[in-house]
Image: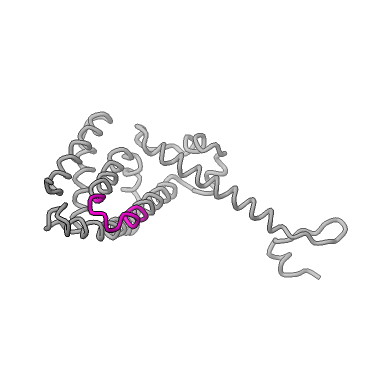
Amino acid sequence: MVTFSLLAGNVDVSAEGSVTVLYGAQTSRRRDAQRNRAAILQAAGEVMSSRDPLPLMPEVARRAGVGQATLYRHFPDRYVLAASVIGDLLHQLEATASANAGRPAMFRPLLREVLDTLVVMRPLVRLAQRLDPGARRRYRQRIVAAFAEPLRCAQEHGYVRGDLGPDDLILLLTMVRGAADGADDEAASRAAGDRSIDLVLDGVFRAR
C-alpha cells in the first residue's frame, strides 16, 4: 500500500521493499541550501560594492563558490538577488537599532553606516531604483521605522536637532545619493558622497 509519506517524497523503498526515512538526508540538503544562499548573498554584497555599474551574475557565482545553476535556483535574476541583499541589510539595520535602544550616542554611527552604504554600494542602489514602486516604498517604510526610536532617544538627550522627523531621514538619503550620482567617475562619486555625508551629519547633530 502506498502511504502519504511516500507520496510526499519523504521515504525511499529499497530493493527488499523496506522503507527508509530520508528526513536526515533532507535536513542535510536543507543545510547545504542555506549555506549556499548565505554564500551567494555575501558574494553579491561584495560585487554590489564594486566599481562595476551593474553586477554580473557569473561573478557572484564565482565569488560564492557555487555553480550558476545553483545561483539561479536561489535567485532567478539580479533583481531578485538585489531585493534579497536589501532585505538582509534592512534586517541588520533593524537588529542593530534594536540592540542599541536607549543609547542616544549610537544614533550618529548608525545613520552614518546607512549613508555610507548608499555611497559604497552604488550598483545595488542602481538596481534598487529599477524595482517596482511598491517594493521601494516598503524599503523606505522599514528604514523610517528602524530609525524612529533611536532618533527620538537622541533628540531627548540633546544629540540631534529637535525639528528632525523620521521622514526627514529619507530626504537625507536622497541628498547623499544625489551627490554621489552627480559625479563624473567612481573616485569623484565616493568623494562627493563622503563630503555630503559629513555636511548632512553636521547639519543634523548638535555640537557637544
Residue visible at 60% across and 47% down? 32
Quadrant location, the N terminus: bottom right
Residue visible at 18% across and 39% down? 198
When asked about the image quadrant of residue 17, the answer is: bottom right
Between residues 7 and 132, which one lies in front from this camera angle? 7
Q: Seen in the image, is 193 located left or right of residue 44?
A: left
When asked about the image quadrant of residue 144, the answer is: bottom left
Instruction: Tell me where residue 109 appears, x and y as whole percent.
Output: 26, 45
Find the residue positioned furthest to the right: 16
Magenta segment boundaries in residue numbering: 94-107
Between residues 186 and 36, which one lies in front from this camera angle? 36
Instruction: Tell me where residue 64 appears, x and y as whole percent.
Output: 51, 38
Residue visible at 23% across and 54% down? 104
Residue visible at 44% across and 41% down? 44
Between residues 61 and 109, which one lies in front from this camera angle? 109
Q: Give above or below for 101 relative to 117.
A: below
Judged by its main secondary structure, the magenta piece is helix
Q: Seen in the image, is 57 located left or right of residue 109?
A: right
Instruction: Tell me where residue 16 appears, x and y as whole percent.
Output: 88, 58
Q: Give above or below for 153 relative to 204.
A: below
Instruction: Tell me where residue 85 appears, x and y as whole percent.
Output: 41, 48
| Residue 98 within the magenta-colored segment of the rendering | yes
| Residue 132 within the magenta-colored segment of the rendering | no
